[in-house]
Amino acid sequence: MDQFDVAVKTHNDAHFALSASPHDSVGMLEIVLGGRQNTRSWISSGKMGEPVVSVPTPGILSWDEFRSFWISWKGGIIQVGYGVHPSNDSIILQWAGFFAGQVQHIGFSTGWGSVGEFKIWRKEDSDDNHNEAFTLGVPHNMVPGSERATAFMIGDVMGPTLNNLDKLLRLPFGCGEQNMIHFAPNVFVLKYLQKTRQLTPEVENEATNYLLQGYQRQLTYKRQDGSYSAFGERDSSGSMW
């Protein structure tokens, strides 16, 4: 990969980073579109570094509509232009002297005091797509330039849970109702991991042990008529459910 296109909707200050590291570094390049209240754009070396090239671009960004741009670093030449298809006619910024192999990560954000929306892939090129607008609230007393944010993308709304199912395993406890509430997830997790062939001996032993103890505890709330209740015979009635 040596280029990408992006659509931006913001008042001003759309920032893009080209870096060898997932973190801010001295060697990264920062591209700013619509800086200085949407009047100027530039490329700088390092975050908030001195511009190596800068051009006037009044009104380049808009809060009313998405504006599309492309960024390329082919052959060590950084180019930024309008639209989604690189061409010499649409170039806004250009700077030579960058090693293309340094680009392993791409970052994007709005500038200090600005909010915006980014579309980082093209809808027409994807059969399955999703657009989500989000706003990151930053405290007013934060030191400018010190803010950080991390975003993760998953393929399923249940992704975080399914990737950490073993964290749902726990020893049942409490009254008859509480015991069952803590008992049930162990059953569901064990069955899911078995069906998907992800069950390890360690997790199986842990889940089975919790199920045995939870089942034995539930029997202590069984009434003489075969029903169960929160506190067994101390309650006035029970339930088969």
Image (cartoon, grey):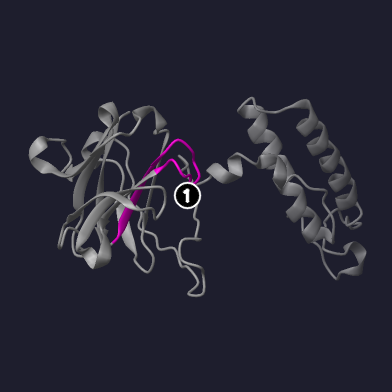
Q: Residue at x 65, y 41 (%)?
A: 164
Q: Residue 156 vs residue 198: left or right?
A: left
Sort mark 1 into few (<14), some (14-19) or many (20+) by Cα contacts within 10 Å: few
Residue 3, by quadrant, is top left
Residue 212 location (% of width, % of height): 86, 40
Residue 75 location (% of width, % of height): 27, 26
Please say whether residue 11 is visible from this viewpoint. no
Residue 120, by quadrant, is top left
Please say whether residue 32 is visible from this viewpoint. yes
Q: Which residues are magenta?
A: 13-28
Q: Residue furthest bottom?
A: 140
Instruction: Report helix, strand or loop for mark 1.
Output: loop
Residue 57 location (% of width, % of height): 16, 57
Q: Nearer the viewer, residue 112 or 26?
A: 26
Give the residue at mark 1. 151
Q: Residue at x 78, y 59 (%)?
A: 178
Residue 131 location (% of width, % of height): 32, 50
Label tally: 1
Q: Residue at x 64, y 24 (%)?
A: 197
Q: Residue 67 vs residue 158: left or right?
A: left
Q: Nearer the viewer, residue 177 or 90?
A: 90
Q: Taking 147 as reference, is 104 above or below it?
A: above
Q: Which of the image's four quarters has the N terminus?
A: top left
> What secondary structure characterizes most of the magenta part?
loop
Mark 1 is on which residue type?
Ala
Q: Which of the image's four quarters has the C terminus?
A: bottom right
* Magenta stretch holds residue 22: yes
* Magenta stretch holds residue 178: no
